[in-house]
Image (cartoon, rainbow, N blue to C red):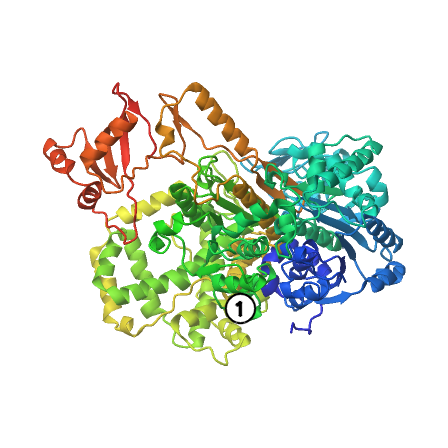
């Protein structure tokens, strides 16, 4: 059970990654909220799951309909045993209540719902009411009741917000009504931008200029405040001022009275920060009744802009069609029902002066009776995020209709009524959309899922309801090295408390088999990389229908991408960052690969900035993290390495340069002999002296070299621009930050040296440290401090290149060895772990960083923010994960449709077809076919916070043109398979006869096996050798037991002796 001693406390271990998306205030609002969902279809369950994971206080669900076979195509909490026996709400309840111990989930009845709708006081118990897959009549009734519930006491904001959502086949609808005056407290959720400024004029209007290379990224209409401005100190009043962006480095103050106000201020001298301020805005919504006749759309895909009117009309006339068909929707695949429905859509659109796309209306009619997991996941992520917005006021809401479709997934031609007929199967909902023939293709899929974290869990759930890998041929392979931690539970919904500490891949496989017992899943605990190529070997990759990444690092993604290109397998790639998500589909012989384009590398912090001239909290946090790594990890590792290896370690150390060697040995002598602790008091003493050195003595030495009033030859103050003049910190045991540093530093020091801290309290340690007599600081003369990275590099090179006293080095080595202490030592090198709140790691880094920030007058960061930056945490929330995985599965369905997942046929039906000369007409037809296939696929980027949805066709694989109408891409190579290991002579002849190419050079790895300049005797010797034996003897390649291929690189000439550029 969750703790109850602090009603407004947030379980940061559970919500850690989500808090970096929403913030504490929004999380508290959610923890006090009550949401009602009417309708637990697959979409309703998806929304409910996301809200429970997010941490609302209470969730009430209403759905008394008995579970039907078709429900199981998207409702992952319904089982075959529930069909016709249990209500949808009963089927889901047992699962929802286990997702989050802090959320109260209970089921209600339709009669209770009706009573709530007729009593505004009762309805106001809910902050949001969500209608899912309900009739338009019921949606209008609920929306009217929500509006009648009035406004929040003492405010103008609507008391009960309304959302509705529907998933019909491959079409989806979302609608919001948050009342006449909904307050958005933070429209984007982005961290307020803060930049340093170089000038403020008193012009009309006043103009602010930022430092060079410091773009402000502000927009016209933003509000900002100023701090630390010298001269014009009056502007540091904390008052938000509206601006107008005039350039990437300049902006003007936009308020009418700004000019007169600024003129009355003192003149700007130097320094200062300008920081963006998030200002609340009010958004007005129409009721559903009003919005139906005057709709306002949020566009989900600009390529489908012309479909909006058709979809709006189609969703609007479902009730009208049902009125004459026993409340039924059009029969799946029925041409007759589709024709009748299209006429209704036409009439509805005409009443709104709109025209329709009849193909879209027909597809809607033929599929709207069905439901699919990918559509439920996509829409469920969006709707749940909108509910959280309604509760918290965080992020901009959808205003007001959102329509989404994935018509590109539908078979061509569309399946018939017979092919879509139900068979009392858990896949009836999907079959109603795609037909039995398509469904059978899903059953046979063999997919490799790399990663079983948040995206991996959602992916497996979607695959389970789709029926992927449920035939004798089918199989899902999932691998993940990681174990489950508590912070995973808020978004990796297949895991529970009991799973903490177990392997993600095996726990996920077990959970998804419980969802669909027909699904065949094999789990691995192996990293996918060069070291596991005997596990994931040639036969393994060749057996796959495709690969799906669910990874969180670029290096692993690039390796899997390379494997997919090598084996010509499709790759589904995705990622999330808070409310942002992206999807990329990599298609063999069609698109570029994941590695074809990369994001620019992160900007590193200059060394001199870290060491002496920080001006942002990120700098002090990185400095603190570096100190942690050096003192608590690297130094103990070096000592234990020396203990184990002895003289070979010293020889390796010499190779790093004399400067590095001396500093390492001096540090080792200090840690082993001079300052080795034997009691907790020693650890406290060390912490106190370290405090003095880091935050007082080093700062005094810096100011000795560069006094506060120092100027350069032009009279410009040294401490200007990004250089902030520091001040030493005087130790005060009553200051909580000072005490935090002392306590954490002493505890970590004790852990490294194995010193017992049993029964030693924080006050004991701080008190002991306060009693330490600190030597008076005496500045050192002749100390050179680098002010640029170039100077720092020169100092380092000079130190390593200098003639260090060999006698001194030997003396250091002798003193360490002679002490005999090394043999006794058993040190623990501490691996930084951000998610263990008991290990003092984040406590130390937070205190250390904030003390350095105090030195340099930088705004400190609380523990939460420090953990984010120092731990390089990726913010995450379940809503984005659900949305993104839904999009990924939609792309998977397109791969199935176009045959890219078939194992019996290749996308390159003729081996090495690229190397065969083609006519101009054939080349043009090939390009046209590429364009046609590309038009089906969508790479996507979304930001649910804004909200923004952007989709585009994947980029075609760049082609290299060669003579003879030949062209090749990254997917092409020469595949030579003669059923045996051919000789070099046979290989050269084969290339000449089949492709008209003369090999001028042949290499394998780093070795040249054949070339025009190779000695004739060697060439003669190798001509009769097989290619494998040459590679083994010359390149020293060791073949794996299951290896089937060898890769050679060739340089070629054509028949005229001209160089021809070929793959590899």
- Within-10-Å neighbours for mark 1: few <14, some 14–19, many 20+: some
Q: How many marks?
A: 1
Residue drawn at point x = 36 percent, y = 34 percent: 911
- Choose between 381 and 668: the one closer to the eye: 381
Q: Is residue 865 above or below residue 887?
A: below
Q: Is residue 604 above or below residue 1011?
A: below
Residue on which the image places disc 1: 499
Does residue 821 appear anywhere in the picture? Answer: yes
- Choose between 857 and 617: the one closer to the eye: 617
Q: Position of residue 1056 (x, y in %)?
A: 26, 18
Does residue 271 appear anywhere in the picture? Answer: no
Left/right of residue 496 with respect to residue 58 in the rendered view = left
Specify the quadrant that holds the N terminus. Answer: bottom right
Left/right of residue 242 with respect to residue 728 in the rendered view = right
Residue drawn at point x = 57 percent, y = 69 percent: 497
**What secondary structure is found at the residue carrying circle 1?**
helix
Left/right of residue 944 with respect to residue 518 in the rendered view = right
Q: Is residue 111 above or below residue 225?
A: below
Specify the quadrant that holds the C terminus. Answer: top left
- Choose between 524 and 636: the one closer to the eye: 524
Q: Position of residue 715 (x, y in %)?
A: 51, 36
């Amino acid at each position: 059970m969750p703790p109850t001693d602090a009603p407004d406390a947030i379980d940061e271990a559970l919500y850690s990654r989500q808090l970096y998306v929403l913030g504490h205030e929004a999380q508290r609002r959610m923890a006090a909220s009550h949401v009602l969902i009417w309708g637990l279809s697959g979409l309703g369950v998806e929304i409910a799951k996301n809200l429970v994971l997010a941490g609302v206080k209470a969730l009430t669900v209403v759905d008394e309909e008995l579970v039907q076979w078709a429900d199981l195509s998207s409702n992952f909490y319904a089982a075959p045993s529930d069909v016709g026996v249990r209500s949808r709400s009963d089927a889901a309840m047992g699962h929802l209540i286990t997702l989050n111990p802090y959320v109260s989930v209970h089921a209600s009845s339709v009669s209770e719902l009706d009573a709530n709708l007729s009593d505004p006081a009762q309805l106001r118990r809910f902050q949001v009411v969500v209608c899912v897959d309900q009739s338009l009549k019921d949606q209008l009734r609920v929306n009217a009741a929500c509006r009648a519930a009035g406004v929040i006491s003492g405010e103008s904001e609507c008391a009960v917000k309304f959302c509705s959502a529907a998933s019909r086949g491959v079409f989806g609808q979302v609608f919001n009504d948050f009342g006449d005056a909904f307050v958005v407290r933070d429209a984007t959720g982005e961290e307020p931008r803060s930049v340093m400024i170089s000038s403020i004029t008193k012009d009309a209007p006043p103009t602010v200029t930022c430092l060079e290379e410091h773009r402000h990224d502000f927009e016209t209409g933003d509000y900002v405040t100023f701090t630390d401005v010298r001269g014009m100190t009056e502007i540091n009043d904390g008052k938000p001022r509206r601006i107008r962006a005039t350039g990437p480095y300049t902006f003007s103050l936009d308020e009418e009275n700004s000019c007169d106000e600024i003129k009355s201020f003192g003149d700007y001298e130097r320094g200062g920060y300008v920081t963006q301020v998030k200002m609340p805005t009010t958004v007005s919504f129409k009721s559903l009744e009003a919005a139906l006749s005057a709709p306002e759309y949020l566009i989900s895909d600009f390529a489908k802009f012309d479909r909006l009117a058709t979809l709006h009309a189609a969703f609007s006339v479902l009730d009208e069609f049902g009125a004459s068909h026993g409340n039924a929707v059009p029969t799946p695949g029925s041409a007759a029902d589709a024709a009748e429905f299209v006429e209704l859509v036409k009439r509805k659109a005409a009443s709104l002066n709109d025209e329709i796309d009849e193909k879209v209306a027909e597809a809607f009619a033929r599929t709207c009776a069905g439901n699919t997991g990918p559509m439920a996941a996509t829409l469920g992520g969006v709707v749940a995020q909108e509910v959280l917005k309604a509760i918290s006021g965080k992020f901009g809401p959808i205003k007001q209709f959102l329509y989404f479709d994935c018509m590109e997934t539908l078979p061509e031609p569309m399946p018939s009524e017979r092919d879509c007929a139900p068979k009392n199967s858990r896949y009836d909902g999907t079959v109603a959309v795609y037909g039995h023939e398509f469904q059978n293709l899903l059953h046979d899929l063999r997919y490799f899922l790399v990663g079983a974290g948040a995206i991996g869990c959602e992916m497996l759930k979607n695959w389970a309801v789709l029926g992927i890998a449920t035939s004798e041929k089918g199989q899902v392979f999932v691998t993940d090295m990681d174990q489950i931690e508590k912070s995973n539970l808020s978004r990796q919904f297949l895991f529970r408390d009991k799973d903490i500490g177990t392997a993600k891949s095996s726990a996920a496989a077990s959970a998804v088999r419980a969802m669909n017992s027909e699904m065949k899943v094999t789990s691995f605990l192996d990293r996918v990389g060069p070291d596991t190529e005997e596990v994931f070997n040639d036969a393994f990759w060749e057996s796959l229908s495709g690969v799906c990444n669910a990874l969180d690092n670029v290096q692993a993604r690039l390796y899997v991408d390379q494997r997919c290109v090598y084996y010509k397998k499709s790759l589904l790639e995705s990622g999330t960052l808070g409310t942002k998500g992206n999807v990329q589909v990599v298609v063999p012989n069609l698109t570029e690969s994941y590695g074809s384009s990369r994001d620019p590398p992160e900007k590193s912090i200059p060394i001199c900035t870290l060491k002496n001239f920080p001006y942002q909290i990120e700098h002090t946090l990185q400095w603190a993290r570096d100190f942690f790594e050096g003192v608590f990890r690297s130094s103990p590792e070096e000592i234990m390495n020396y203990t184990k290896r002895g003289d070979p370690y010293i020889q390796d150390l010499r190779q790093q340069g004399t400067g590095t060697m001396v500093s390492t040995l001096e540090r080792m002598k200090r840690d082993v002999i001079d300052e080795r602790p034997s009691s907790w008091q020693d650890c406290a003493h060390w912490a106190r002296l370290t405090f003095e050195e880091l935050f007082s003595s080093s700062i005094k030495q810096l100011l000795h070299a560069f006094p506060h009033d120092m100027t350069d030859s032009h009279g410009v103050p040294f401490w200007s621009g990004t250089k902030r003049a520091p001040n030493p910190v005087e130790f005060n045991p009553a200051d909580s930050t000072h005490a935090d540093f002392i306590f954490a530093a002493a505890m970590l020091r004790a852990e490294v040296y194995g010193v017992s801290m049993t029964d030693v309290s924080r006050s004991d340690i701080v008190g002991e440290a306060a009693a330490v007599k600190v030597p008076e600081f005496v500045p050192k003369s002749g100390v050179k401090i680098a002010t640029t990275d170039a100077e720092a590099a020169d100092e380092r090179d000079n130190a390593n290149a200098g003639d260090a006293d060999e006698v001194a080095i030997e003396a250091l080595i002798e003193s360490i060895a002679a002490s005999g202490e090394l043999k006794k030592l058993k040190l623990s090198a501490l691996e930084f772990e951000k998610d263990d709140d008991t290990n003092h790691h984040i406590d130390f880094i937070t205190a250390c960083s904030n003390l350095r920030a105090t030195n340099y007058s930088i705004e400190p960061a609380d523990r939460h923010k420090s953990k984010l930056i120092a731990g390089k945490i990726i913010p995450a929330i379940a809503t984005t994960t659900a949305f993104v995985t839904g999009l990924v599965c939609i792309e998977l369905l397109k791969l199935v449709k176009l045959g890219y997942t078939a194992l019996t046929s290749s996308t390159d039906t003729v081996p090495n077809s690229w190397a065969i000369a083609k006519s101009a007409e054939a080349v043009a037809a090939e390009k046209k076919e590429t364009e046609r296939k590309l038009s089906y696929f969508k790479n996507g980027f979304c930001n649910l916070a804004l909200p923004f949805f952007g989709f585009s066709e994947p980029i075609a694989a760049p082609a290299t043109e060669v003579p003879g109408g030949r062209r090749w891409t990254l997917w092409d190579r020469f595949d030579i398979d003669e059923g045996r290991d051919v000789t070099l002579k046979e290989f050269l002849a084969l290339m000449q006869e089949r492709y008209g190419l003369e090999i001028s050079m042949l290499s394998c790895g780093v070795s040249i096996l054949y070339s025009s300049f190779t000695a004739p005797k060697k060439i003669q010797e190798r001509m009769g050798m097989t290619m494998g034996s040459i590679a083994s003897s010359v390149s020293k390649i060791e073949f794996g037991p299951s290896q089937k291929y060898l890769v050679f690189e060739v340089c070629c000439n054509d028949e005229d002796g001209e160089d021809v550029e070929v793959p590899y």
